[in-house]
Image (cartoon, coloured by chain):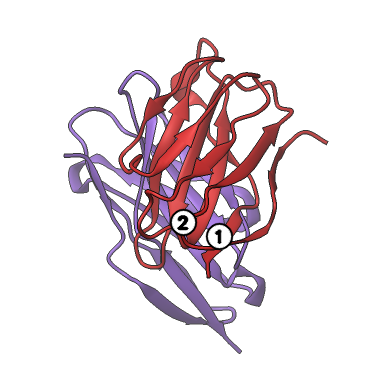
Chain colours: A purple, B red
Amino acid sequence: AQSVTQPDIHITVSEGASLELRCNYSYGATPYLFWYVQSPGQGLQLLLKYFSGDTLVQGIKGFEAEFKRSQSSFNLRKPSVHWSDAAEYFCAVGLNTGFQKLVFGTGTRLLVSP
Amino acid sequence: DGGITQSPKYLFRKEGQNVTLSCEQNLNHDAMYWYRQDPGQGLRLIYYSQIVNDFQKGDIAEGYSVSREKKESFPLTVTSAQKNPTAFYLCASRNRGLLSMNTEAFFGQGTRLTVV
């Protein structure tokens, strides 16, 4: 079955430090990959997406992600974290099951220390 | 502004009662979805609809019902058959155009349902 794994439940990063959130997927075909961010009690906002082409994609708020087919990964990165980046981050895979079902990982909560 | 509106933001239900969560979108999207979010479990798909008057069960549809009488609206009813309804519910919509594989889902702000 298709699945998305985010191995880190919580990550704490100092403000100004770099960030990498891990995402691995299990899917036989070419995946459609997304990263969403969620602030407490809010809906999800799209950070970036990958469908094809350049494997390094740029998103909003200074985030980027790299698709590595050989590792089945789509890790999210940011060179310098701001306190406002503290939130929960979800990786998702779009499946071609006739309506493009989105399968989500369990999320990684980012804490930013001063 | 275009977007998805969920109401109410907070909802309390007594055991044995049915409650309906509202989801309205003015994005002219064909597809709409309901997800349930529990701590540590990510988002799980309850129901989805690709067009008006059509909807399909997702992974955890038991105890829930939906309708899609209008393109803009996709209400979710949490019935008394749902054994553990306390959760955060998210509605989403997506464009199903020719490039439907390449479009992302847009989410509402969510409804937190608590059984008291």
Apparent side of residue A13 relative to residue A4 in the rendered image (left or right): right
User: What residue occupies the far right of the structure in this picture?
Assistant: B1
Residue A69 locus on image (x, y percent): 24, 40
Q: Please state, as top left, top right, bottom left or bottom right, where the N terminus of chain A lies in the image.
A: top left
Q: Name the residue located 61 percent from the left edge and 45 percent from the top edge.
A: B21
Q: Quadrant of residue A107?
A: bottom left
Q: Please name the amino acid that badge 1 sits on.
A: Leu
Is residue A52 visible to the viewer in this orientation of the structure? no
Residue A33 locus on image (x, y percent): 39, 39
Classify 10 Å Cα crowding around label 2: few (below 14), some (14-19), many (20 and above).
Answer: few
Q: Name the residue located 55 percent from the left edge and 68 percent from the top edge.
A: A87
Apparent side of residue A44 relative to residue B5 in the rendered image (left or right): left
Looking at the picture, tell me which residue is in the foreground, B68 or B50: B68
Q: Please state, as top left, top right, bottom left or bottom right, where the C terminus of chain A lies in the image.
A: bottom right
| Numbered disc in front, either 1 or 2 | 2
Looking at the picture, tell me which residue is in the foreground, A42 or B68: B68
Q: Name the residue located 39 percent from the left edge and 63 percent from the top edge.
A: A21
Classify 10 Å Cα crowding around label 1: few (below 14), some (14-19), many (20 and above).
Answer: many
Q: Secondary structure at mark 2?
A: loop
Q: Quadrant of residue A103?
A: top left
Disc 2 target residue: B16
User: What residue occupies the far bottom of the structure in this picture?
Assistant: A114
Image height check: is B108 above or below A5? above
Image height check: is B64 above or below B54? below
Mark 2 belongs to which subunit? B
Disc 1 target residue: B113
Is residue A111 visible to the viewer in this orientation of the structure? yes
